[in-house]
Amino acid sequence: MHYKSNVLIRNKRASFDYEFIDRYEAGIQLYGTEIKSIRDGKAGLADTYCTFQNDELWIKNMHIATYVFGTYNNHDVQRDRKLLLHKKELQKLHKQIKESGLTIVPTKLYINDKGIAKLEIALARGKKSYDKRQTLKEKEDKRMMDRAMKR
């Protein structure tokens, strides 16, 4: 059975603040009510970040709304959640973060075709303010070109 889902939650701020170097797909350790809320599209990646604790990767500040039909078993809205990656990927990420001052930023939360919640994370370098201005200028130029093409 293939599960077709249109759930796609993006961290729009991440591409503005960071330059992505490498991307990874990670699983998330969730409770039952959390996955149900994600399937309803009630989650947010604003102000989220990833950090290592005891050689495990954790996501902090990820907001998953309480499930409407949940009872006293409902989850904590902003608890820390463990990310699931292969051991070699974790070691590679940990090494790159320690050495070069990079960070790990969540970029997308989605449900794959098997019905499993996945988080796309990116190894990223912070942009300087002039880089941000350049990004805005490119976006504005593209918008103007699109308008000119439609006429």
Image: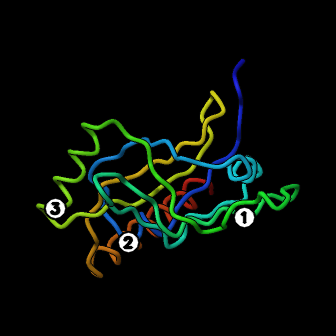
The residue furthest front is: 72
Q: Amino acid at mark 3?
A: Lys
The residue under the point 82% across, 62% down is: 72
Q: Position of residue 19 (x, y in %)?
A: 30, 62
Which quadrant of the figure has residue 64? bottom right
The residue furthest left is: 99
* Crowd tier of the residue under label 2, counting other residues whose Cα lies within 10 Å: few below 14, some 14–19, many 20 or above: some
Q: Amino acid at mark 1?
A: Ala
Query: Which numbered dot is residue 17?
Result: 2
What SS does tag 1 mark?
loop
Q: Position of residue 137 (x, y in %)?
A: 39, 72
The mark lying in front, picked from 2 and 1, is: 1
Q: Considering the image in quadrants, where does the N terminus appear?
A: top right
Q: Position of residue 74 (x, y in %)?
A: 76, 59
Q: CA distance from mark 1 to mark 3?
A: 33 Å
* First reached walking from the N terminus: tag 1 or tag 3: 1
> How is colour applied across the structure in the image?
rainbow
Q: Nearer the viewer, residue 49 or 34?
A: 34
Query: Which numbered dot is residue 65?
Result: 1
Q: In the shown orientation, is residue 48 left or right of residue 5?
A: left
* First reached walking from the N terminus: tag 2 or tag 3: 2
The residue furthest right is: 69
Mark 3 lies on residue: 98
Q: CA distance from mark 2 to mark 3?
A: 20 Å
The residue furthest top is: 1
Q: In the shown orientation, is residue 73 left or right of residue 2?
A: right
